[in-house]
Image: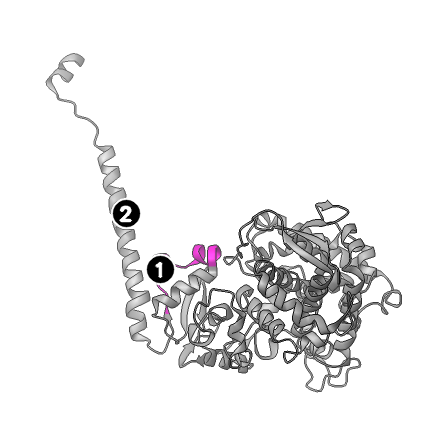
Amino acid sequence: MFDSTFASGAVSAPSYPSEKYLVVGKLMSCLLSALIIWRLWRFTISPALHPSHPKEFPSWMPCHAAAFFRDSNGLLSQARKHFDHSKAPFALTVLGMTFYVITQSKHSAEVYRNTETLSFEDFVQGLMKTNGNRDSAIRRMYTSLPVSKIGFPNPQGESLGVLAQKMHIHQLHPGKNLTLLQERVHAWINHHLNWGSIQQSTSPSFKGLTHIELPLYQWCSDYFVRLGQHVYFGHILAEVDHDLPNSFFQFDELIWKMLYQYPGFLSYDMSVPRSRIITSLRKYFTIPQVERKEGAAWLINSMEDEAKAIGIDEENLAIIMFHLYFAINTNTRKTAFWLLTYLIYNPPLLAAYRQEIEPAFAGHTLVNPFYIQDAANCPQVDAIWHETLRLSGWSASVRLVTQDTVIGGKLMRKGNRVLVPHRLLHFGESLFGERPNEFRPERWQRGNLSRSSSWRPFGGGKTMCSGRFLARFSVTTFVATLLRRFDLEVVGNPPFPQADEGRPVLGTMSIKEGHDFYVRLLPREI
């Protein structure tokens, strides 16, 4: 029977595979239809029904997460192009968060003026929690304090979290407190930027009788972190942990993982050096203040006193001060690298820089560092500083919308975020002239670009970077002293280093991995 059944063809092949494919096909059709309907509603019908809302940059996925994490600057540029470079705010969604993107300077001014319904403290508190501050410590930092409290004046009855910004301004805006820090910077650079000190540093790969070769990015980073921590914390912190600058370098090159709040299993390489920094700062603050007070800046001592007065323990104090430590050190090291790199790759510009700073020196010694801060004395130095900031800056401002708010004629809904990407504003041809992607300092010698509302390298409003004056003084003093004392040559023929534009930072961009290059330092005869 078995043979005859097969012979007669009575038994056919099972139909299950074709039915399975049919089900899968129907499922895929349903998913595709749902996606088309969702996209039609989200980006066509809903905007037509709500013309007062910012138009949203469309996508075929529920959000732009992959593109945002890969290259947020590129995504924002693509979105702006999609809307034909319209000056109206637009929206985009990343991992369930809607950002309203501001692309016109007039609208960014509205953002910075609005301190009632747009909050910066949300971003700060989020960082504090990400980096380990307990909720109780964050609440203490943002609980209003009495007008009559002792210590730093508090006439408005604000919290320490808000007062901290005013304390930064007290220390870092022009005046005697800033001058004290500038004098420390000048003295440290004068003492540590010489042949013997550079030979003893950890960066040089070759130390000869006539020259030294070193990786420029790594060296600038090590030098400026040591400078920054000395100026603010004195020599005690270096004694607590001599390798702290290296830990910070490792952390800061991966800071985007902190900003994006990567989970622990994906951010171990960032979290380990972060923990080492916090541990070293905790050890520093366990030393009796009387033993370190004289070497530390007023800001460090005062922040410590104010925090302890509201019950912040040493563990949480170290984390709070960690945020100050990376704010001090994250940008100057990279800005110095980019400024030197642009000069090294442009010998005529380097020669002009040297000639302009010459009156500030007596032999190899910078006797008047304030001379080179004055644009009237040194217009080239001023123009090169601004152009370096323009091309190397990644800064952006973020605010939480705490109540429905109208910006640029568009309704921003409560719970979403407003994003002001300054880098987009810094490449507008209408203001900065032709070829905005090129390093052309001469663009700053016409008109008054540095006072334009589109020029925001340090943010804006009450959260504008208070360290901008000391940053410029430190970088220009370093570069001037280096060029006076040494000739610099590129080792080999490396291409111009590329900036890592895709990853967010809190100011100046890093270089792409593998793009550091070696320079040869030769003592210069005067």
Front residue (pair 258, 520): 520
Q: Which residues are magenta?
A: 56-71
The quarter of the picture where residue 120 lies is bottom right
Q: What amino acid is found at the position of numbered circle 2 in the picture?
A: Leu
The quarter of the picture where residue 46 lies is bottom left
How many tags in the picture? 2
In front of the other: label 2 or label 1? 1
Q: Can residue 506 be seen in this snapshot? A: no
Q: Which residue is the site of mark 1? A: 59
Residue 331 drawn at (x, y percent): 63, 64
Q: Can residue 104 be seen in this snapshot? A: yes
**Magenta-colored stretch includes residue 62:** yes
Q: What residue is shown at x 58% (from left), y 64% (from top)? A: 348
Quadrant the N terminus occupies? top left
Residue at the extreme left? 8
Q: Is residue 12 above or below residue 165?
A: above
Quadrant the C terminus occupies? bottom right
Q: What amino acid is found at the position of numbered circle 1 in the picture?
A: Ser
Q: CA distance from mark 2 to mark 1?
A: 22 Å
Residue 293 drawn at (x, y percent): 85, 69
The quarter of the picture where residue 504 lies is bottom right
**Magenta-colored stretch includes residue 484:** no
Label 1 residue SS: loop
Q: What residue is shown at x 89% (from left), y 65% (from top)? A: 291
Residue at the extreme front? 526
Q: Which residue is the site of mark 2? A: 27
Residue 143 drawn at (x, y percent): 68, 76
